[in-house]
C-alpha cells in the first residue's frame, strides 16, 4: 500500500535535482520536430523523471515490450501540441520508450519536452501510478 508520505516525498521532496532544456521553448520544440516529426509533443515544467523500482521479472516484461522502467510526472503543462492538456495542468505519462538529450521523454503517443530544471527520483510502480486525474 502506498503511503501519503511516499507520495509527498515523490512530488515535493527536494532530492534528485536534474537539468532539462535550458534554451528557448521554440528551440526545444524545433529540435523535437526534427527528431520526432509525426509525434505529438507536450512542453512541461517542474517535472520529475521517475525511475521505477521493478522486480527482475517486471523489468524483463517491460524490455520485451520495448519500454523503459520509467514514467514522467510534471507539475505544469506549458503547451500540448494536440490540446489534450490545458496550460497549468499537471500530467503523468505512461511508460517511456526513450529518454534523450536529458530533455525529451518519449512515450508511445507523446514526446514530453522537459523545459527547465526538474528532478530525477526513484519510486515504486504503485507510488508512481497512484496519481491519476480522476
Image (cartoon, rainbow, N blue to C red):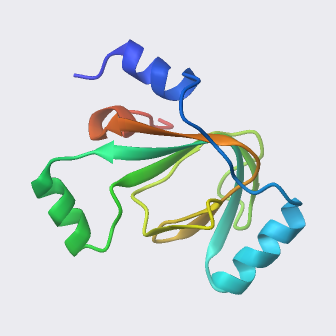
Looking at the image, residue 134 sits to the left or right of residue 26; the answer is left
Q: How many labels does the image show?
A: 0
Asked whether 4 or 119 is in front, the reply is 119
Q: Quadrant of residue 91?
A: top right
Asked whether 94 or 97 is in front, the reply is 97
What residue is drawn where x is 36% and y is 35%?
123
Image location (x, y in percent) of residue 38: 63, 85
Looking at the image, residue 70 sits to the left or right of residue 119; the answer is left
Image location (x, y in percent) of residue 47: 63, 42
Image location (x, y in percent) of residue 61: 17, 64
Q: Quadrant of residue 13?
A: top right
Looking at the image, residue 124 sits to the left or right of residue 23; the answer is left
What residue is drawn where x is 49% and y is 53%?
93
Classify 3 as above or below 93. above
Image location (x, y in percent) of residue 57: 10, 56
Q: Quadrant of the N terminus?
A: top left
Identity of the residue furthest to the left in this view: 57
What residue is drawn where x is 85% and y is 60%?
25
Classify 91 as above or below 5. below
Amino acid at each position: 500500500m502506498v503511503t501519503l508520505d511516499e507520495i509527498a516525498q515523490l512530488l515535493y521532496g527536494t532530492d534528485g535535482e536534474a537539468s532539462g532544456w535550458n534554451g528557448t521553448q521554440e528551440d526545444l520544440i524545433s529540435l523535437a520536430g526534427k527528431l520526432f516529426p509525426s509525434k505529438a509533443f507536450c512542453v512541461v515544467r517542474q517535472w520529475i523523471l521517475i525511475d521505477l523500482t521493478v522486480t527482475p521479472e517486471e523489468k524483463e516484461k517491460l524490455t520485451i515490450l520495448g519500454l523503459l522502467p520509467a514514467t514522467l510526472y510534471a507539475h505544469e503543462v506549458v503547451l500540448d501540441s494536440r490540446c489534450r492538456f490545458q496550460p497549468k495542468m499537471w500530467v503523468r505519462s505512461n511508460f517511456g520508450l526513450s529518454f534523450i538529450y536529458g530533455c525529451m521523454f518519449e512515450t508511445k503517443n507523446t514526446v514530453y519536452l522537459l523545459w527547465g530544471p526538474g528532478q530525477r527520483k526513484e519510486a515504486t510502480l504503485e507510488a508512481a501510478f497512484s496519481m491519476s486525474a480522476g
